[in-house]
Image (spheres, helix red, strand yellow):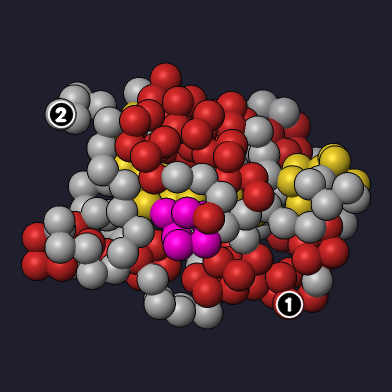
Amino acid sequence: MANISRKQIVLGITGGIAAYKAAELTRELQRKGFDVQVVMTRAAGSLVTPATFQALSGKPVFSDLWDPRIADNMGHIELSRGKEAIVVAPATADFLAKIANGLADDLLSTLCLARECPLLVAPAMNRQMWDNPATRRNVERLLRDGVNILGPGSGDQACGEVGLGRMLEPQEIAEAVVMQLSPKLLRGVQVFRADRRGPRHHQPQLRENGVRRRTCRARCGRQGKPDHRAGHPARPGGRRDHARRDDRADV
Protein backbone atom coordinates (compact mmCIF):
# COMPACT_ATOMS: atom_id res chain seq x y z
CA MET A 1 0.00 0.00 0.00
CA ALA A 2 1.31 3.45 -0.92
CA ASN A 3 2.28 5.83 1.84
CA ILE A 4 -0.04 8.81 1.32
CA SER A 5 2.51 11.14 2.93
CA ARG A 6 4.93 10.45 0.08
CA LYS A 7 4.73 12.21 -3.27
CA GLN A 8 3.40 10.18 -6.17
CA ILE A 9 5.28 10.03 -9.45
CA VAL A 10 4.99 8.11 -12.74
CA LEU A 11 8.18 6.63 -14.19
CA GLY A 12 7.86 5.91 -17.90
CA ILE A 13 10.31 3.50 -19.51
CA THR A 14 10.79 3.27 -23.27
CA GLY A 15 12.73 0.82 -25.42
CA GLY A 16 16.27 2.16 -25.15
CA ILE A 17 19.23 0.09 -24.04
CA ALA A 18 19.50 2.38 -21.00
CA ALA A 19 16.23 0.88 -19.73
CA TYR A 20 18.26 -1.28 -17.35
CA LYS A 21 19.24 1.92 -15.48
CA ALA A 22 15.57 2.59 -14.74
CA ALA A 23 15.71 -0.03 -12.00
CA GLU A 24 18.29 2.01 -10.12
CA LEU A 25 16.35 5.18 -10.88
CA THR A 26 13.29 3.65 -9.23
CA ARG A 27 15.33 3.15 -6.06
CA GLU A 28 16.81 6.64 -6.21
CA LEU A 29 13.38 8.23 -6.52
CA GLN A 30 12.14 6.21 -3.57
CA ARG A 31 15.10 7.42 -1.52
CA LYS A 32 14.09 10.98 -2.40
CA GLY A 33 10.62 10.40 -0.94
CA PHE A 34 8.57 9.39 -3.98
CA ASP A 35 6.15 6.53 -4.50
CA VAL A 36 6.86 5.30 -8.02
CA GLN A 37 4.28 4.01 -10.47
CA VAL A 38 6.01 2.39 -13.47
CA VAL A 39 4.55 2.52 -16.98
CA MET A 40 6.44 0.73 -19.77
CA THR A 41 6.20 0.60 -23.54
CA ARG A 42 6.13 -2.80 -25.22
CA ALA A 43 9.60 -2.17 -26.61
CA ALA A 44 10.90 -1.60 -23.09
CA GLY A 45 9.49 -5.02 -22.14
CA SER A 46 11.91 -6.57 -24.62
CA LEU A 47 14.84 -5.23 -22.59
CA VAL A 48 13.66 -5.34 -18.96
CA THR A 49 10.81 -7.23 -17.35
CA PRO A 50 7.76 -5.76 -15.61
CA ALA A 51 8.33 -8.18 -12.74
CA THR A 52 11.57 -6.38 -11.85
CA PHE A 53 9.84 -3.03 -11.48
CA GLN A 54 6.85 -4.48 -9.68
CA ALA A 55 9.22 -5.93 -7.10
CA LEU A 56 11.13 -2.64 -6.74
CA SER A 57 8.14 -0.29 -6.67
CA GLY A 58 5.66 -2.52 -4.86
CA LYS A 59 3.04 -1.62 -7.47
CA PRO A 60 1.71 -3.34 -10.58
CA VAL A 61 3.36 -2.24 -13.82
CA PHE A 62 1.18 -1.07 -16.72
CA SER A 63 1.86 -1.09 -20.44
CA ASP A 64 -1.49 -1.76 -22.12
CA LEU A 65 -3.77 1.14 -23.00
CA TRP A 66 -6.77 -1.17 -22.46
CA ASP A 67 -5.60 -2.81 -19.24
CA PRO A 68 -8.75 -4.21 -17.51
CA ARG A 69 -7.16 -3.75 -14.07
CA ILE A 70 -7.80 0.01 -14.37
CA ALA A 71 -11.31 1.33 -13.75
CA ASP A 72 -13.23 2.03 -16.97
CA ASN A 73 -10.11 1.09 -18.97
CA MET A 74 -8.95 4.70 -18.72
CA GLY A 75 -5.37 4.19 -17.62
CA HIS A 76 -4.19 7.28 -19.48
CA ILE A 77 -6.40 9.32 -17.14
CA GLU A 78 -6.30 7.44 -13.86
CA LEU A 79 -2.54 6.88 -13.74
CA SER A 80 -1.63 10.55 -14.08
CA ARG A 81 -4.14 12.11 -11.70
CA GLY A 82 -2.75 13.20 -8.36
CA LYS A 83 0.85 12.72 -9.49
CA GLU A 84 3.60 15.25 -8.91
CA ALA A 85 5.24 14.55 -12.27
CA ILE A 86 5.76 12.11 -15.10
CA VAL A 87 9.40 11.18 -15.67
CA VAL A 88 10.34 9.27 -18.83
CA ALA A 89 13.78 7.66 -18.62
CA PRO A 90 15.08 6.55 -20.97
CA ALA A 91 13.28 8.58 -23.63
CA THR A 92 14.14 7.31 -27.11
CA ALA A 93 14.23 9.42 -30.27
CA ASP A 94 10.99 7.75 -31.33
CA PHE A 95 9.25 8.68 -28.10
CA LEU A 96 10.46 12.30 -28.26
CA ALA A 97 9.06 12.53 -31.78
CA LYS A 98 5.72 11.18 -30.61
CA ILE A 99 5.13 13.62 -27.80
CA ALA A 100 6.57 16.55 -29.76
CA ASN A 101 3.93 15.97 -32.42
CA GLY A 102 1.05 15.03 -30.14
CA LEU A 103 0.90 11.35 -31.12
CA ALA A 104 -0.75 8.99 -28.65
CA ASP A 105 -0.74 5.38 -29.81
CA ASP A 106 0.15 3.57 -26.59
CA LEU A 107 -0.39 3.96 -22.85
CA LEU A 108 2.71 6.02 -22.08
CA SER A 109 2.38 8.53 -24.93
CA THR A 110 -1.35 8.93 -24.24
CA LEU A 111 -0.59 9.40 -20.54
CA CYS A 112 1.83 12.22 -21.39
CA LEU A 113 -0.75 13.92 -23.59
CA ALA A 114 -3.53 13.74 -20.95
CA ARG A 115 -1.43 14.81 -17.97
CA GLU A 116 -2.07 17.61 -15.48
CA CYS A 117 1.46 17.60 -14.06
CA PRO A 118 5.00 18.45 -15.23
CA LEU A 119 6.69 16.16 -17.77
CA LEU A 120 10.41 15.45 -17.54
CA VAL A 121 12.24 13.35 -20.13
CA ALA A 122 15.77 11.96 -20.09
CA PRO A 123 16.87 11.34 -23.70
CA ALA A 124 18.96 8.28 -24.49
CA MET A 125 20.16 7.47 -28.01
CA ASN A 126 23.13 7.21 -30.34
CA ARG A 127 25.10 10.43 -30.82
CA GLN A 128 24.12 10.70 -34.49
CA MET A 129 20.46 10.25 -33.63
CA TRP A 130 20.76 13.02 -31.05
CA ASP A 131 22.47 15.34 -33.56
CA ASN A 132 19.95 14.60 -36.31
CA PRO A 133 18.08 17.78 -37.34
CA ALA A 134 14.73 16.04 -36.87
CA THR A 135 15.59 15.19 -33.25
CA ARG A 136 16.82 18.72 -32.64
CA ARG A 137 13.55 20.16 -33.96
CA ASN A 138 11.55 17.84 -31.74
CA VAL A 139 13.57 18.81 -28.67
CA GLU A 140 13.16 22.51 -29.41
CA ARG A 141 9.41 22.06 -29.77
CA LEU A 142 9.23 20.17 -26.48
CA LEU A 143 11.13 22.94 -24.72
CA ARG A 144 8.70 25.52 -26.11
CA ASP A 145 5.84 23.35 -24.86
CA GLY A 146 7.25 23.44 -21.33
CA VAL A 147 8.68 19.91 -21.21
CA ASN A 148 11.80 19.56 -19.07
CA ILE A 149 14.71 17.91 -20.90
CA LEU A 150 17.18 16.20 -18.57
CA GLY A 151 20.46 15.71 -20.40
CA PRO A 152 21.65 13.92 -22.31
CA GLY A 153 25.15 13.25 -21.07
CA SER A 154 28.29 12.59 -23.06
CA GLY A 155 30.51 9.52 -22.96
CA ASP A 156 30.77 5.90 -24.04
CA GLN A 157 27.68 4.50 -25.72
CA ALA A 158 26.39 0.95 -26.03
CA CYS A 159 27.13 0.99 -29.77
CA GLY A 160 30.82 1.56 -29.06
CA GLU A 161 30.83 5.21 -30.10
CA VAL A 162 31.53 8.22 -27.89
CA GLY A 163 29.54 11.45 -27.72
CA LEU A 164 26.31 13.12 -26.64
CA GLY A 165 23.28 10.91 -26.21
CA ARG A 166 23.90 8.95 -23.02
CA MET A 167 21.10 8.99 -20.50
CA LEU A 168 22.05 10.82 -17.32
CA GLU A 169 22.92 8.62 -14.37
CA PRO A 170 19.98 7.66 -12.12
CA GLN A 171 21.22 9.79 -9.23
CA GLU A 172 21.50 12.84 -11.51
CA ILE A 173 17.96 12.34 -12.79
CA ALA A 174 16.53 11.89 -9.30
CA GLU A 175 18.24 15.07 -8.09
CA ALA A 176 16.94 16.98 -11.13
CA VAL A 177 13.41 15.80 -10.38
CA VAL A 178 13.67 16.99 -6.79
CA MET A 179 15.01 20.37 -7.90
CA GLN A 180 12.24 20.77 -10.47
CA LEU A 181 9.49 19.98 -7.97
CA SER A 182 10.91 21.95 -5.04
CA PRO A 183 9.08 25.18 -4.16
CA LYS A 184 10.78 28.20 -5.69
CA LEU A 185 11.78 30.76 -3.04
CA LEU A 186 10.73 33.76 -5.14
CA ARG A 187 7.69 32.21 -6.80
CA GLY A 188 4.87 34.76 -6.79
CA VAL A 189 7.12 37.61 -5.59
CA GLN A 190 7.26 40.73 -7.75
CA VAL A 191 10.70 42.32 -7.94
CA PHE A 192 11.05 45.94 -9.02
CA ARG A 193 14.27 47.56 -10.23
CA ALA A 194 14.81 51.25 -9.69
CA ASP A 195 16.57 52.94 -12.60
CA ARG A 196 18.29 56.10 -11.41
CA ARG A 197 19.03 57.12 -14.98
CA GLY A 198 15.34 57.41 -15.89
CA PRO A 199 13.48 60.64 -16.78
CA ARG A 200 13.20 63.29 -14.09
CA HIS A 201 9.44 62.79 -13.72
CA HIS A 202 10.09 59.14 -12.80
CA GLN A 203 12.39 60.04 -9.91
CA PRO A 204 11.09 59.34 -6.37
CA GLN A 205 8.87 62.05 -4.91
CA LEU A 206 8.71 62.77 -1.17
CA ARG A 207 6.37 64.93 0.88
CA GLU A 208 7.30 66.88 3.99
CA ASN A 209 4.67 68.94 5.84
CA GLY A 210 2.41 68.65 2.82
CA VAL A 211 5.09 70.09 0.47
CA ARG A 212 6.36 67.95 -2.37
CA ARG A 213 10.12 67.76 -2.75
CA ARG A 214 12.25 65.94 -5.25
CA THR A 215 15.36 63.89 -4.67
CA CYS A 216 18.37 65.37 -6.40
CA ARG A 217 20.83 62.51 -5.90
CA ALA A 218 21.68 62.40 -9.57
CA ARG A 219 22.92 66.03 -9.45
CA CYS A 220 24.37 66.58 -6.00
CA GLY A 221 24.16 63.32 -4.08
CA ARG A 222 21.91 64.87 -1.42
CA GLN A 223 18.22 64.57 -0.74
CA GLY A 224 16.35 67.69 -1.80
CA LYS A 225 14.34 70.13 0.31
CA PRO A 226 11.48 72.34 -0.90
CA ASP A 227 13.90 75.12 -1.85
CA HIS A 228 16.87 72.88 -2.59
CA ARG A 229 16.78 73.46 -6.34
CA ALA A 230 17.73 77.06 -5.71
CA GLY A 231 21.09 75.84 -4.53
CA HIS A 232 22.00 74.40 -7.90
CA PRO A 233 24.02 76.57 -10.27
CA ALA A 234 21.93 78.00 -13.07
CA ARG A 235 22.33 76.38 -16.44
CA PRO A 236 22.97 78.72 -19.37
CA GLY A 237 19.67 79.35 -21.07
CA GLY A 238 17.69 77.82 -18.19
CA ARG A 239 14.63 79.38 -16.61
CA ARG A 240 16.51 80.61 -13.54
CA ASP A 241 19.18 82.06 -15.79
CA HIS A 242 16.56 84.03 -17.71
CA ALA A 243 14.98 85.13 -14.43
CA ARG A 244 18.33 86.50 -13.19
CA ARG A 245 18.83 88.38 -16.45
CA ASP A 246 15.35 89.90 -16.10
CA ASP A 247 16.15 90.94 -12.51
CA ARG A 248 19.33 92.64 -13.65
CA ALA A 249 17.45 94.44 -16.39
CA ASP A 250 14.99 95.91 -13.88
CA VAL A 251 17.73 97.40 -11.66
> Is residue 20 placed above or below 149 in the rendered structure?
above
The three-letter amino acid code for the residue at tag 2 is Met
Residue 66: x and y in percent read: 23, 69
In the rendered structure, which segment of residues is drawn in magenta? Answer: 40-45
Please tell me which residue is depicted at 15% across the width and 63% down the height of the picture: 68
Distance from disc 2 to disc 1, alpha carbons, whole Å, reads 43 Å
User: In the image, 139: left or right of 244?
Assistant: left
How crowded pointer 2 is (Cα within 10 Å; few <14, some 14-19, many 20+) is rated as few
Q: Is residue 34 above or below residue 137?
A: above
Residue at 79% x, 57% y is 126
Instruction: Name the foreground residue: 145 vs 188.
Output: 145
The residue lying toward the viewer, choosing from 81 and 165, is 165
Report which residue position mark 2 lands on.
1
**Residue that carries the numbered disc 1 in the rendered image:** 134
- The answer to whether residue 240 is magenta is no
Where residue 135 appears, x then y in whole percent?
71, 70
191 displayed left or right of 57: right
